[in-house]
Amino acid sequence: MSIVFFVLAVPLFGLFSLLTVLIFRTTAEWAVILGGFVGPIFAAVIAHKATRRPPRGTDDSEE
């Protein structure tokens, strides 16, 4: 999960910072603060869902 998180965290940080400036017409300081909080949270959720293991008892291997 950590590799996926770090690959996604930086681009999402930048994306949310840019969207904050464009949508809310705010200063760069607030954009960095919001992007710094929201970007990594989204990255963690995506990384968790991408690396989730299937539930126990659903093994499709043939015996």
Image: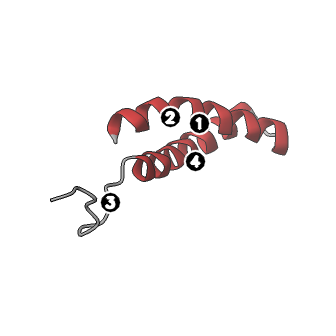
Q: CA distance from mark 4 to mark 2?
A: 12 Å
Q: Is residue 25 visible?
A: no
Q: Which mark is residue 54?
A: 3
**Of 34 and 3, which appears nearest the observer?**
3
**N-terminal label among 1 and 3:** 1
**N-terminal label among 1 and 4:** 1
**Of 55 and 23, which appears nearest the observer?**
55
**Of 25 and 57, which appears nearest the observer?**
57
Q: Is residue 25 above or below residue 46?
A: above
Residue at 71% x, 31% y: name it: 28
Relative to 29, is 13 on the left or the right? left
Q: Disc 1 marks which amino acid?
A: Leu
Circle 4 residues within 10 Å: few <14, some 14–19, many ≥20: some
Mark 1 — residue?
12
Mark 2 — residue?
8
Asked whether the residues under the numbered discs 2 and 1 touch, taking CB atoms below 8 Å apart as contact, a structural biologist would say: yes
**N-terminal label among 3 and 4:** 4
Q: Disc 3 marks which amino acid?
A: Pro
Residue at 62% x, 35% y: name it: 32
Residue at 31% x, 55% y: name it: 53
Circle 1 residues within 10 Å: few <14, some 14–19, many ≥20: some
